[in-house]
Image (cartoon, helix red, strand yellow):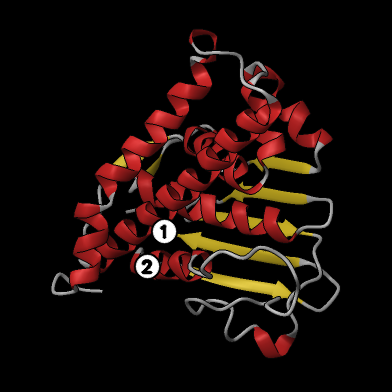
Amino acid sequence: MTRKDPLVDLLIHDLTGPLSIVLTSVNNLLSKKDKCEPYNEYQRDTLKRAQRNAEKAKALLLEIIEVYRSEEGLFRRDAFLISDILREALVDAIEVAAPSIGEELAHAEVSNYAEILEQNGITIEVAGRYEKTPFTHDPKKIRQILRNLISNALKYRKNTMRLTITGDLDLVIAVTDDGEGIPPEKQDYIFKRFFHANREKDEPEGLGFGLSCVKNLVEKMRGEISLKSGEGTGSCFTVRIPPL
């Protein structure tokens, strides 16, 4: 993607505004239901479905914009706590990939998040230097990498997902799921855009953009991403990013 690509300009400039209006309108209808006639179950489910799909479209658009900016070499340099970015990324990913869990979190106190996540097979661990010390890089891009890895794991897991963040100098992110895994012959293609590891399955698919987006961002940030997986053994994606 380059600045000469008219499709990218269309996505960034002409779709961001209308999409935000749609999402705001749906959110208002859901949050101000007391000012409207009581919704029946069909109306409420329809609004929530519209909300989820608008969130998916917004997330994809933001991913394209961030990849576009990274290819132009545009990075912010901020010091931030990983725990803050992780919490935001986790909520974003869950709202789209696991909306039922998102509903639980939406009505819970922040102090109860860990318990709700564990009850739903999601384990989070932050250790090492960046448990309490700020990491220096572009927070939007770190958040995007986390959101994509979490979304991917939630999408393909059977029951569990584990995310660990460690590192003494470089930031190390590992996301593991207990899904069906990726056979060796497909692992060379998993980071290509529009590729689906389980295309033959009768299940909803996105655009296959998430992992290619992660790889692109990580490499532009002078980091690396690796995959450990096998058919029937689940998958573990590990990302290593040096501070900026």
- The image shows residue 218 at horizontal and vertical percentages of 42, 65
Q: CA distance from mark 2 to mark 1?
A: 7 Å
- The image shows residue 92 at horizontal and vertical percentages of 53, 40
N-terminal of the pair, mark 2 or mark 1, is 2
**Left or right: 206 in relation to 29:** right
Q: Quadrant of residue 156?
A: bottom right
Viewer can see residue 89: no
Which numbered dot is residue 222? 2
Which residue sits furthest left?
4
The type of residue carrying mark 1 is Pro
Q: Residue at x 55, y 34 (%)?
A: 47
- The image shows residue 41 at horizontal and vertical percentages of 70, 27
Q: Residue at x 66, y 63 (%)?
A: 204
Which residue sits furthest top?
35
Residue 46 or residue 28, whichever sits in front: 46
**Left or right: 83 in relation to 111:** left
Q: Residues within 10 Å of mark 1 (few under 14, many from 20)?
A: some
Q: Quadrant of residue 228?
A: bottom right
The type of residue carrying mark 2 is Arg
Q: Residue at x 51, y 64 (%)?
A: 210
Residue 226 or residue 204, whichever sits in front: 204
Labelled pair 2, 1 in contact (Cβ < 8 Å): yes
Position of residue 76 relative to residue 196, above or below, is: above
Residue 193 or residue 147, whichever sits in front: 193
Position of residue 77 relative to residue 109, above or below, is: below
- The image shows residue 94 at horizontal and vertical percentages of 62, 42
In this figure, which residue is indicated by the disc labeled 1?
242
